[in-house]
Image (cartoon, grey):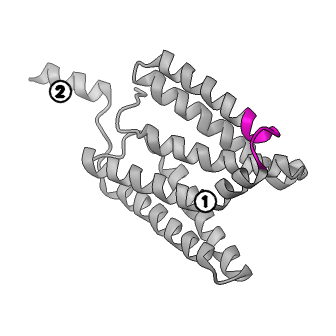
């Protein structure tokens, strides 16, 4: 059974913020869609995750409110109402936002003793992508950004290790079966 148990809404919201900043910066600079197209798909995935976490926790109205607020924020970020320097600063901070979100998720996993609904494949792919960012950033320069990318890869590795060591939470069928046996 799908549930919102053991999933961290703050983690997903921070990822959404980071992807939104990148997408908004690309839109403001009128880059061709090929330059940031995958960000749009990740953005849609994060928006759906935010809503579904609320939905499966029984907070559908709260999920709808979050979607409405997010739509307004994204409109502001891509309009002339927000100075471009704000969007560019958000984009520069996006790696640190991702690191923060990963550490929050790792903390939630540690507190609950489970990774809940986290997907092994998804976490593994995020880890591989973070290794790609490390490689690209070290080729371009040895800057603070490169160090942040290395730290992000370490946080992704931490989540991957947690998925391997923490047991999966019991499904509702297993819980019902155990109750019947008792």
Report helix, strand or loop for mark 1.
loop
Crowding around mark 2 (Cα neighbors within 10 Å: few <14, some 14 to 19, many 20+) is few
On the image, numbered disc 1 is attached to which residue? 93
Residue located farthest toward the left when viewing the structure as drawn: 182
Quadrant (top left, top right, bottom left, bottom right) of the N terminus = top left
Q: Quadrant of residue 133?
A: bottom right
Residue 167 left/right relative to 129: left
Q: Is residue 58 above or below residue 46?
A: above
C-alpha distance separating marks 1 and 2: 47 Å
Residue 165 left/right relative to 131: left
Assess whether residue 178 is covered by the magenta stretch: no
On the image, numbered disc 2 is attached to which residue? 178
Residue 172, x across and y down, in percent: 31, 25
Does any portion of residue 66 appear in the rendered image? yes
- The residue at 73%/35% (across/down) is 76
From the viewer's side, name the closer residue of 166 and 101: 101
Does any portion of residue 124 appear in the rendered image? no
Quadrant (top left, top right, bottom left, bottom right) of the C terminus = top left
Q: Quadrant of residue 75?
A: top right
Q: Is residue 84 above or below residue 49?
A: below
Q: Which residues are magenta?
A: 75-83
- The residue at 37%/54% (across/down) is 106
């Amino acid at each position: 059974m799908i549930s919102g148990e053991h999933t961290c809404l703050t983690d997903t919201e921070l990822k959404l913020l980071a992807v939104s900043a990148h997408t908004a910066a690309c839109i403001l600079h009128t880059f061709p869609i090929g330059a940031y197209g995958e960000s749009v798909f990740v953005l849609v995935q994060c928006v759906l995750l935010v809503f579904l976490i609320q939905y499966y926790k029984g907070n559908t109205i709260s999920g709808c409110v979050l979607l409405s607020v997010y739509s307004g924020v994204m409109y502001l970020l891509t309009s002339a109402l927000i100075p471009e320097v704000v969007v560019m600063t958000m984009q520069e901070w996006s790696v640190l936002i991702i690191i923060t979100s990963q550490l929050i998720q790792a903390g939630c996993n540690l507190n609950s003793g489970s990774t809940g609904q986290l997907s092994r494949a998804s976490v593994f792919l995020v880890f591989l992508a973070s290794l790609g960012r490390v490689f690209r950033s070290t080729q371009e320069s040895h800057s603070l950004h490169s160090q942040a990318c290395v730290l992000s890869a370490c946080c992704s590795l931490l989540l991957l290790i947690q998925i391997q060591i923490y047991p999966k939470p019991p499904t509702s069928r297993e819980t019902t079966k155990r109750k019947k046996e008792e």
